[in-house]
Image (cartoon, grey):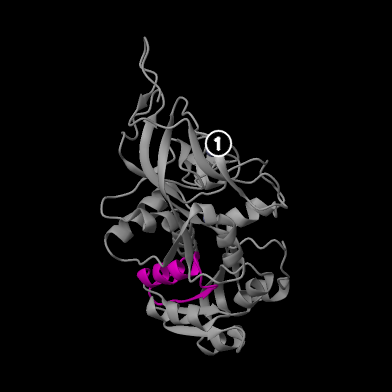
Amino acid sequence: MSTSTYEDTAVAGAETPALMKAAVVHSFTEPLRFEEVATPVPGEGEILVRIEASGLCHTDIHAAHGDWPVKPTPPFVPGHEGVGIVEQLGAGVTQVVLGDRVAVPWLGYACGSCDHCVSGWETLCTEQRNTGYSVDGGFAEFVKASADFVVRVPDGVDPLDAAPLTCAGVTTYKAVKVSGARSSDLVAVFGIGGLGHLAVQYARIAGARVVAVDLQDDKLALARELGADFTVNAAKEDPAAVIQALGGADAAIALAVAPKAFRTAYDSLRRGGTLVFVALPAENGVEIPIFETVLNGITIVGSIVGTRTDLREVFELHAAGRTRVIREERPLAEVNEAIADVEAGRVPARVVFEL
Ligand SMILES: [Zn+2]
Ligand SMILES: [Zn+2]
């Protein structure tokens, strides 16, 4: 909508409507409201993206409920798996052009100059802004984003696949990376859902044998289909005993939003093993024994999303046909029903809102 006056300030594509539909959190105790709000206007270094697909992550549900110690401030628009087409360029933007397809991930901005940023750990930047949490996210027809922090989606990658890869993909890809998984390893993946079904595939790509753990047989069947070598139904068997009988896990990746699963993952490790904390349960604690951790040389590491480089690699692997995204499309107007279904474990892997 914006036009150039005496100076080139911004570049617009097609006529952008002044109002857009968005799913807005007004209160942590009420459902989201699907309503019309003003379309954001990109400032210097920012772009406006017309959303095509937007994935629903557990983090969005925690954001909407205000579950975590650091809470977002309502009203806000959740969503950090938004994928769409660059519609407007703010002043000074040269990183992308109109019509590019980009992903707008959780890491919406980082300072670029602190020790974390310059050492390749921009995800630890204390100045970071998070899409769908501290700045409005992708549960809307348009989202405003920092041009430096969007990641281009390669040709041939379906936007409906790109959306879940933007958080679930990059998060599990990075978790497998930090686990140090190698070709001779056994990797245990705890929780086969939106994240877990991708973690299984990334561990396989790293060359490891994979054991998938979940409470539901259909999710375990999916894990097998995606390359898991072993599966354990934690409702029927003790995963730690089964995995120890396989020799113990070199790495365990905790993706289930239950502290008990973190403890079971710990108990499934072999000596020298690594436990990666990824899921963020509302109940913020798990008891880990000091004695066994010391004697067995266990490493426990937290892993939060991934960098822009990690996301580029995730898209590259998908474009090369190395990964499959299991998803279910829903209209954004049904955001509250989708949240209820995810909380009840009624969706196969990932819900993606189609816009
Ligand atoms: Zn997420
Ligand atoms: Zn920084």
Q: Is residue 49 magenta?
A: no
Is residue 307 or residue 115 the one in the foreground?
307
**In the image, residue 2 above or below residue 73:** above
- For this view, does 76 lie left or right of residue 332? right
Which residue lies under the disc numbered 1? 37
| Percent of width and height locating residue 284 | 72, 61
Decide: few, some or many residues near mark 1? Use Cα within 10 Å; few <14, some 14-19, many ≥20: some
Mark 1, secondary structure of its residue = strand
Q: Residue at x 56, y 88 (%)?
A: 242
Please report the bounds of the magenta region as a residue range.
179-206
Q: Residue at x 45, y 82 (%)?
A: 221
Residue extending furthest toward the top: 6
Is residue 216 or residue 295 the one in the foreground?
216
For label 1, being within 8 Å of ligand 1 is answered no
Q: Which quarter shows the N terminus?
A: top left
The residue type indicated by label 1 comes to: Val
Is residue 58 or residue 256 the one in the foreground?
58
> In the rendered image, which quarter is residue 114 located in?
top right
Q: Is residue 186 magenta?
A: yes
| Percent of width and height locating residue 78 | 57, 47
Residue 8 seen anywhere in this rendered image of the structure: yes
> In the rendered image, which quarter is residue 49 located in?
top left
**In the image, residue 38 above or below residue 224:** above
- For this view, does 76 lie left or right of residue 174? right
| Percent of width and height locating residue 116 | 53, 43
Residue 131 seen anywhere in this rendered image of the structure: no
> In the rendered image, which quarter is residue 240 located in?
bottom right
